[in-house]
Image: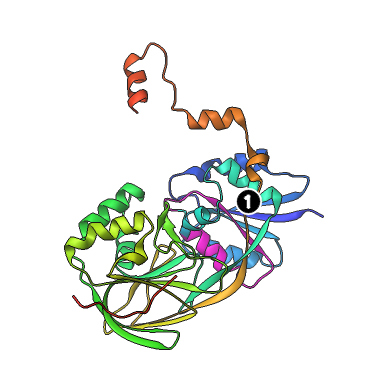
Amino acid sequence: MKNKVLFLINPISGIGKQKTVETAVQTQIDHEKIEVEIAYTQYAGHARELAADAVGKFDVVVAVGGDGTVNEAGSSLVNTTTALAIIPTGSGNGLARYLDIPLKVNKAVQVINHMELRAIDTLKVNDLVSLNVAGIGFDGHISHKFAKLKNRGPAGYVRLITREYTNYKSSTYRIEVDGNAYELPAFMLTFANSSQWGNNIHIAPQAKIDDGLIDVCIIKEFPVYEGPSLLISILDQSLDQRRYDVVTQAKDIVIESDNKLVGHVDGEPVDLGKKARINIHPLSLRVLVPPADFRRYSFDPINDLKELLPPIPPLPSISGISRNLMGGGKDIEPDEK
């Protein structure tokens, strides 16, 4: 019997790779083993509705889009027998990168042929599901601003952070971590299921997506001049070594504030009121991942080499040729300042 697979394509996601998905499905899917249907999402939340309707009717729902599309589809598949697959076409692709799903559409489609399943944890943030990383504070603030940009990409994200950083004010939070209570001013509170936000920027380097624990990253209030140190610690995966940062693990977290909690769930902006509860749901979602020897199955010497090389301009264009050549945790206690 064939596996029934539903592709949910977000036509406006990220950088436009989704335009090639239908062709990839025709050429890369093993149609002798897999029966395919394709649907396009038409509005925010549509992927969630389509995935919910697919439960029990399809073996796999494929989210074609960015982290928001993946979250919508996956949140409807939690605690069901229908698995999630990912064709990453967004600007961050955090969960796909963590799971080693190829960023090239053809190869990501090939992963589906192997039907290699892995059970992963999911988070609940109040009534919302997070598959990857959720946060409150500066990253939530940036998420709300980023959602309003017309050109959403890594460069725009960096520009936004640079512009907003010096004017952002930390808030005081009452934090309860597995029953232990603290109160402290914090720049950012991050709740990580996997290790990274996206684009290989790691907020919780030691996080594991199937260990039944949330990696809680608390970046306490710090002097403005410490900003570059924070950035470096995220890039070189040494966040837990800074005196202003705490990384611990927990199963249940409660955050309260006198002000509204501005947050994000898998990069999508959310308003959480003045109280948020975050808890873990172990091994609650099945996801398709590449098999261990996927490179052997998917290696295409000619096309892979063409993708690695820069484009070759027409021979008469000397200037064109020139341009191409140049072309884990610790106790949560505020430090004394």
Position in image of residue 204 (x %, y %):
42, 64
Q: Is residue 81 above or below residue 180?
A: above
Extent of the magenta region? 68-92
Residue at the spot 59% in from the left edge and 27% down from the top edge = 302
In which quadrant is the N terminus drawn?
A: bottom right
In the rendered image, the quadrant that contains the C terminus is bottom left
Q: Identify the amino acid type marked 1.
A: Pro
Task: State the image quarter where residue 63 is shown.
Answer: bottom right
**Position in image of residue 151 (x %, y %):** 33, 48
Q: Can residue 43 be seen here?
A: no
Quick check: can you spot residue 246? Answer: yes
Kindly give the residue lying farthest to the top in the view shown.
316
Q: Is residue 75 left or right of residue 324?
A: right
Front position in the image: 125 or 236: 236
Report the side of 2 relative to 220 (left or right).
Answer: right
110 w.r.t. 244: above or below: above
Q: Nearer the viewer, residue 20 or 248?
A: 248
